Amino acid sequence: MPSRVAVVTGSNKGIGFAIVRALCKEFEGDVYLTARDEERGKKAVEDLEKEGLHPKFHQLDITNQKSIDNLQKYLKDKYGGLDVLVNNASIAYKVKDVAPFAEQAKVSVACNFTGTLDVCKALLPLIKPHGRVVSVASLAGTWALEKMSPERASKFKSPSLTETELVSLLEDFVNAASDGTHTEKGYPNSAYGTSKAGVIVLTGMQARDLKNDPREDILINACCPGYVMTDMSSHQGTKTPDEGAETPVYLALLPPNVGQPQGEMLSDKKIVKWR
Ligand code: NDP
């Protein structure tokens, strides 16, 4: 029988690396540290080997469809599916970054939202019964939903919103950012926040769609790791990466048949209301 298997995206450093560390200790099965850069990924595996842990490695760039397809085929051939997926990979511009907002919106949405969506499209069909999917979002995403105009927010929060409509909303945000009309159109002034709002809404939608799925007991949730000392936060923050990994790991290891949380956004292991 193939081993159980877990995959963590963007895990050569930061919170993703700490999630792999924790899963190596707590998950019964193979744990894949993935990275867009093979050298950085393999170095990270070596670092965990020095701690007596044995993650495996696979290359994955979430913005590259060929890379996603390669991982999908590998998992299908070697394991016949996937038990745990943690969507952790993301980028964030620093506050002082001088890149135009239009560029920040385009690049942030392409990686954080579209990249996560593309990984989900490829890997959710592989998730086995009792599988767990976690998308590391951010409270910046729930704040972005709060800062939208009521009309815009109601579109994001509509219980009947489809994936195609959500993709169109994010495209509309990027287009509005490029001509400077995003605030006029009711979007918040945060590229990162809006991309993470997309991930939170996507997670709710994916959980809703699982209701009609014959596979048993799959749970999918989003979370905020907290304010964590990593490269992304310029090593500011209140949590170590291991502490930041706690909520994502809790969701990745929810025991069989607990039934919930499902389609929620969590912070410090508690549900955050955003709808
Ligand atoms: P880091 O910047 O330290 O790490 C991000 C990781 O994502 C790196 O491994 C990076 O790889 C990888 N990555 C970026 N783009 C891609 C891509 N296209 N394909 C694959 N991997 C990619 O960030 P954190 O560890 O702080 O963040 C982890 C998660 O937590 C993110 O989703 C972030 O948004 C979220 N978060 C973090 C907070 C914090 O305070 N730190 C607060 C709230 C949420 P590379 O080394 O090659 O760049």
Image (tube, grey):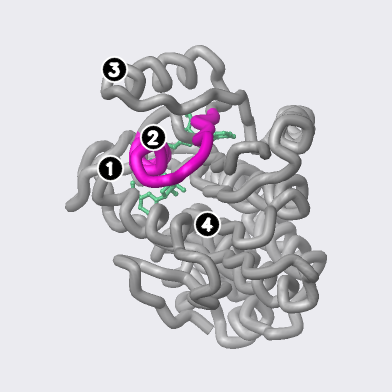
Distance, label 3 to label 1, CA atoms, is 18 Å
Q: Disc 2, ligand 1: is the CB inside 8 Å?
A: yes
Q: Which residue is at 54% across, 72% downward?
A: 257
**Mark 3 residue CB less than 8 A from any atom of ligand 1:** no
Taking depth in this image into account, of 188 and 42 the one nearest to the observer is 42
The local secondary structure at tag 2 comes to: helix
Callouts 4 and 3 close, C-beta under 8 Å: no
* Amino acid type at mark 1: Pro
- Residue linked to disc 1: 241
Q: Mark 3 or 1 closer to N-term? A: 3
The residue wearing badge 3 is 50
- Disc sitting over residue 134 in the figure: 4
Q: Nearer the viewer, residue 16 or 219?
A: 219
User: Label 2, on which residue?
Assistant: 17
Callout in the foreground (3, 2) = 3
Would you call the spot at circle 2 few (<14 residues within 10 Å), some (14-19), or many (20 or more)?
many
Q: State the separation of the CA atoms marked 1 and 2.
A: 8 Å
Describe the element under mark 1 as helix, strand or loop: helix
Magenta stretch contains residue 68: no
**Apparent side of residue 84 relative to residue 159 in the rendered image (left or right):** left
The stretch of residues the image draws in magenta is 14-34
Badge 2 amino acid:
Phe
Q: Nearer the viewer, residue 190 or 231?
A: 231
